[in-house]
Amino acid sequence: MTPTCNHLDENIRARSVSILQRALTFALDLALQSKQSHWNIKGPGFIALHQMLDDLTGQMHDAADTMAERLVALGGFAEGTAQHIHETTRIVSELGHRTGQADVLTALTQGYATFSQSLIGQIDETAQTGDPTSSDVLTEVSRTVDKALWFLEAHLPSDKLARSVLSEQTALAGQ
């Protein structure tokens, strides 16, 4: 931790830095997955999905930037390299080399849903630790992720959405 005049106790700052770093890694991972999907998705709704996925990439980059800046303001060091993301991400990606719309959107929906779920615990944890500002930052990110999740789900056929939800609930139960 670098010295700072931030009023929070160093233990609180260190805890928040750790929580924010985990969320930062999620956001960067999803930004990369969204961009890969943007480049490779195929099908009749291509242009709308291509543009939406580019927007989602930008939103995840903006969320990552907000969290990284808060993390550094607390005296931490923001880790955002591809290597760090690869080594520490907790998102199990089903994306692979998929290009079909339903498969890509299902995989992304699962990733965004996992991130959304993890944010809820991180919001509570930072608030209980005594850092309401970091909790607020994570709440802002949560709103962005939930809206992105809504956009992704809106493009899924109901049978794919139901399977995606069941898969996500199974994955969360295993954590």
Image (tube, helix red, strand yellow):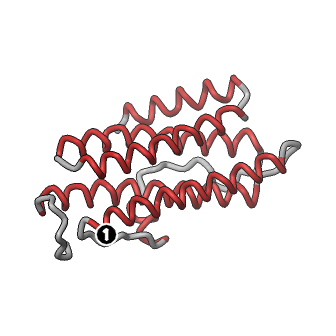
Is 20 placed left or right of 62 in the picture?
Answer: left
Q: Position of residue 84 (x, y in %)?
A: 41, 69
What is the quadrant of residue 119 in the picture? top left
Q: Quadrant of the N terminus?
A: bottom left
Residue pushed farthest bottom? Answer: 2
Q: Secondary structure at mark 1?
A: helix
Is 88 placed left or right of 124 in the picture?
Answer: right
Q: Which residue is at the front of the view, 79 or 75?
A: 75
Residue at 67%, 60% in the rendered image: 36
Residue at 69%, 23% in the rendered image: 159
Q: Position of residue 149 (x, y in %)?
A: 58, 38
Amino acid under label 1? Val
Q: Quadrant of the C terminus?
A: top left
Q: Position of residue 129 (x, y in %)?
A: 17, 46
Residue at 52%, 45% in the rendered image: 144
* Count of picture labels: 1
**Mark 1 Cα within 10 Å, few/some/many (few <14, many 20+)?**
some
What is the quadrant of residue 128 in the picture? top left
Q: Is residue 153 above or below residue 119?
A: above
Is 14 placed left or right of 70 in the picture?
Answer: left
Q: Is residue 47 above or below residue 148?
A: below
Q: Which residue is mark 1?
A: 72
Residue at 40%, 35% in the rendered image: 172
